[in-house]
Amino acid sequence: MELTEHRTYRMSARAEATAETGERILDAAVQLFWEHPSDQISLEAVAAKSGVTVRTVIRRFGSKEALLAEGIAREAHKERSARDKAPVGDTPAAVAALVANYEITGERALRMLAEEQRLPSLAPIVDAGRAVHRNWCADTFAPALTGLHGSHRRRTLAKIVAVCDVYTWKVLRRDLNLTRDQTVLAMVELLAPMMKES
């Protein structure tokens, strides 16, 4: 009995160590991805940053593309969880929460979108992100869509999605140098006509 318990403990400890190593490798890959174009990231750099061998990285993830895709998918999941906290039906509060999220993740999202063509494995993740954004807009601004049908509803939702897009944040916040509060106000003002359509 003691031998079985000892073996079970060793297997459990090994599984935990393997999971921790995988997370460390993903952390290193994601950090490098945010700092450099994907074609400038090597498995050697990921291995060195995570304190493992290249062989360990390959054994765990298979390829650089698969590694980066898994790392970005993990980050996208975290962002979805943060967005779910935005209040439904309160436009200023929802936009403030969205802008707060973009202040943390916006540059990263823009980098991922720029890398979409270089890394085909990112396409499903980016597509899933677009679907999540569309669904978030539909849920968060549901009162503005109530009573709308067909093409009118699709068009209104499309306008809301566009106003809430990371590129809109980039234009207002980065390109035109609005403050964070001014960016929130500008997006709320852009959304105002849609909020009156319901």
Image (cartoon, rainbow, N blue to C red):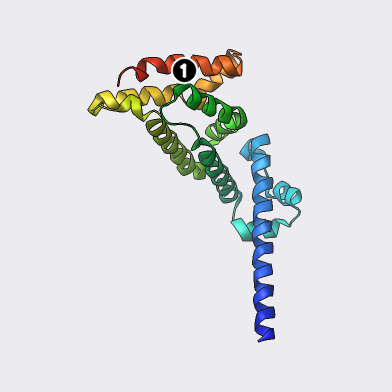
Q: Is residue 153 visible?
A: yes
| Residue farthest along the bottom direction in this orientation | 1
Image position of 103 (left or right of 131): right
Q: Residue 130 location in percent, x, y?
A: 44, 35
Q: Is residue 36 visible?
A: no
Q: Residue 136 location in percent, x, y?
A: 43, 34
Which residue does the numbered mark 1 point to in the structure image? 188
* Residue at 67% in and 74% down: 9
* Residue at 48% in and 27% down: 94
Q: Secondary structure at mark 1?
A: helix
- Give the mark count: 1
Q: Residue 13 location in percent, x, y?
A: 69, 68
Above or below residue 111? Residue 120 is: below
The quadrant of the rendering that contains the N terminus is: bottom right
| Residue farthest along the left direction in this orientation | 150
Image position of 42 (left or right of 83): right
Q: Amino acid at mark 1?
A: Val
* Residue at 33% in and 23% down: 156
Foreground residue, 137 or 142? 142
Q: Residue 175 location in percent, x, y?
A: 58, 15
The quadrant of the rendering that contains the C terminus is: top left
